[in-house]
Amino acid sequence: MRRIYVNEKWCLGCHLCEYNCAFSNSAETDMVKALKDVHINPRIRIEEEGNIHFAVSCRHCEEPLCVKGCIMGALSIEDGVIMIDQDKCVGCCTCILMCPYGAIMPSDTGVMQKCELCVKNAGGTPACVESCPNRAIVFEER
């Protein structure tokens, strides 16, 4: 299965992946309308430590602890992609505690959100990969 991988040596810490993720997961067709005067809540997050920058997103584990720990059954695996059913999620945060990578976070509505590889909105390549100017984020099979 293809997954997102990050080469922190190439990451500039520009946060374009975050903005494009937030835009891609909004219902808008215009980026300015989607993000102007809005605190973005992307499903990928840039972490910084000194001169090192790296993107944190769901790794779509083969045996995901988050899915096993979800008390409502809101997390499931569909074709290798871990998905969240927003209607089932009650925002208990158990999945956040279970994820060893810190890749699940609350959404603006209080339920959880995570990277779903843009399967519902980009149709091919995740928005963060497409927008990375330095090609530090790749979508490939390893």
Image: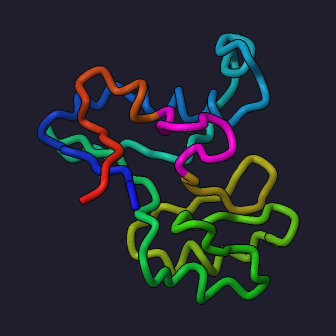
Q: Is residue 92 left or right of residue 61?
A: right
Task: Give the quadrant of residue 1.
Answer: bottom left
**Residue 107 in the image, given as x and y percentages of width and height:** 70, 52
**Residue 27 in the image, given as x and y percentages of width and height:** 79, 30
In this view, the residue in front, 99 or 37, is 99
Against 1, residue 121 (above or below) is above
In this view, the residue in front, 96 or 3, is 3
Outermost residue toward the right? Answer: 87
Colour pattern of the rendering? rainbow
Q: Residue at x 63, y 81 (%)?
A: 94
**Residue 74 in the image, given as x and y percentages of width and height:** 75, 74
Task: Give the quadrant of residue 51.
Answer: top left
Count of numbered tags: 0
Q: Residue at x 61, y 73 (%)?
A: 77
Q: Is residue 83 magenta?
A: no
Q: Is residue 137 left or right of residue 110?
A: left
- Most common secondary structure along the magenta stretch: loop
Residue span colored magenta: 117-127
Against 117, residue 61 (above or below) is below
In this view, the residue in front, 126 or 54, is 126
Against 140, residue 19 (above or below) is above
**Residue 83 in the image, given as x and y percentages of width and height:** 65, 64
